[in-house]
Image (tube, helix red, strand yellow):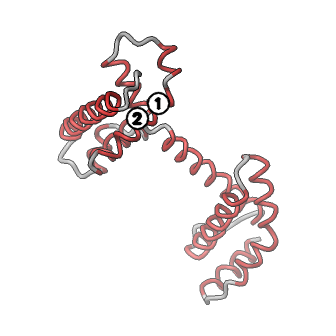
Amino acid sequence: MENSLQLIRQNLKEGDNSEIARIFTEHGDYCIRTLIRNTNCSKQDAEDILMESVLNFRDKVVSGKVTYLTSIRQYIYSTCYNMWLKEYQKRKRREIVGVDLIKFYVEEYSETMDTSEYFDNKKAMIRITKKAMATLKTKCRRVLSLFYVERYSMKEVAKMMNFANDNVAKTIKSRCFNTLIAEVKRIQEKEKIRL
């Protein structure tokens, strides 16, 4: 396999992408079928992920990051599976972008609400919070998402957002959160929804 990888690398560096086409032909159907069976993803998602995995394989072979493999098929499938997991987690985070924020709202601003009401109204909360998030400035949406959804520390948020330090990040996060809560309340009153 090592000689095979060296040949693939050499061909790719010379602009010959026939090996990539061969990998698609030989391993594509297997990877797509197995990914669908193991993850329940759609065929379109599986095909997109396969394409990305093969291109990732090409880049790693050319750059010398992959120097030895026992099975190209297994490498491509493993990459597909890991990419799907990452994408799935991103989608889940996007779907619940408001849940953690609203949970804080419920806990901090509405002490009278019991847990059963929270779960009964979760869909309304998500919808309202997403609507409220969409009204925030990009910086606020990013800070709140990084902290509450993606679970970065204030120090990491400060670095990612190019803030002077984590205290600045905390102040901005607090302001943004209060703006979000005010907007949630405004939408809630406007739509006459009781959360």
Which amino acid does the dot numbered 1 rest on? Answer: Ala
Residue linked to disc 1? 124
16 with respect to 169 (left or right): right
Say above or below: 121 vs 79. Answer: above
Please name the residue shown 71% across and 54% down the image.
42
> Which residue matches tag 2?
128
Q: Callout 2: few (<14), some (14-19), or many (20+) C-alpha neighbours within 10 Å?
A: many
Residue 118: image x %, image y %?
47, 19
Query: Which x, y percent locates residue 68?
Result: 69, 66
Percent from the top left, x then y, of residue 20? Answer: 70, 77
Give the quarter of the image for residue 72: bottom right
- Residue shown at 37% from the left, 10% from the top: 112
Residue at figure coordinates x 61%, y 66% from the top left: 52
Label 2 sits on what residue type?
A: Ile
- Would you place residue 146 above or below residue 47 in this image? above
- Determine whether the residue tagged by mark 2 lies in a helix, strand or loop: helix
**Please, is residue 170 above or below residue 86 in the view?**
above
Q: Are marks 2 and 1 in contact (CB under 8 Å)?
A: yes
* Position in image of residue 155 (x %, y %): 28, 40
The residue lying toward the viewer, choosing from 183 and 67, is: 183
In front of the other: 180 or 38: 180
| Image quadrant in which you'd find residue 65 | bottom right
